[in-house]
Amino acid sequence: MVRVLIYHKAKDPEKLMAVIRDVRNEAMKRRGYITGETLVSTDDPADVIVITTWQTLKDWEAWDTSDQRQELNKKINLLLEEPYVVRTYQHYLVREDRVWSTM
């Protein structure tokens, strides 16, 4: 399983939320999508993090590089003060004082 964190700095947080909902609705149709959530900073509503969970990194990459995602990204980019940042993480298990990858 892979978690994807996407950091946004919004010009208009409300408009960005509408586009993020559209992106999520389309991502939910894609192979490997598990879940997603959107977090807004309590200090600055322009700081928005989208967290999604995918079965594999390949599933995420297939969505991220798809034509549909690229078209939606154009709408997102118009609403950002700076380019968004994507970070991917994998899950780990702790067992008998050792860390084991779940990959």
Image: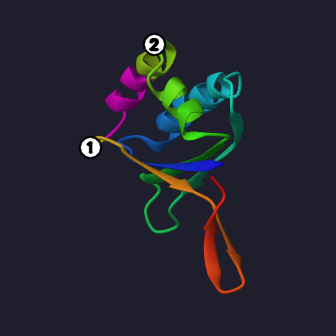
Q: Residues within 10 Å of mark 1 (few under 14, many from 20)?
A: few
Write down the quadrant of residue 99 in the picture. Answer: bottom right
Give the crowd class for mark 2: few <14, some 14-19, many >=20 residues within 10 Å. Answer: few
**Image coloring type:** rainbow
Most prominent secondary structure in the magenta stretch?
helix
- Which is more toward the observer, 39 or 100? 100
- Disc 1 is placed on an element classified as loop
Identify residue type, mark 2: Asp
Q: Where's residue 41, x and y in %?
A: 50, 62
At 28% from the left and 43% from the top, the residue drawn is 81
- Contact flag, marks 2 and 1 (Cβ < 8 Å): no
Q: Quadrant of residue 54?
A: top right
| Residue 48, magenta (yes or no) | no
Question: What is the number of callouts on the image?
Answer: 2
Disc 2 target residue = 67
Span colored in magenta:
73-80
Residue extending furthest bottom? Answer: 97
Image x and y of residue 47, in percent: 43, 55
Image spot of residue 19 (x, y percent):
53, 29
Q: Is residue 26 above or below residue 81?
A: above
Q: Residue at x 62, y 60 (%)?
A: 91
Mark 2: secondary structure = helix
Residue 80 vs 72, above or below: the answer is below
Q: Nearer the viewer, mark 2 or mark 1?
A: 2
Provide residue 33's location: percent of width, then percent of height.
68, 34
- The three-letter amino acid code for the residue at tag 1 is Glu
Q: CA distance from mark 2 to mark 1?
A: 22 Å
Give the residue at mark 1. Answer: 82
Q: Residue at x 58, y 50 (%)?
A: 3
- Label 2 or label 1, whichever comes before in sequence order: 2
Using the image, determine if residue 59 lies above or below residue 94. above
| Left or right position of 103 against 58 | right
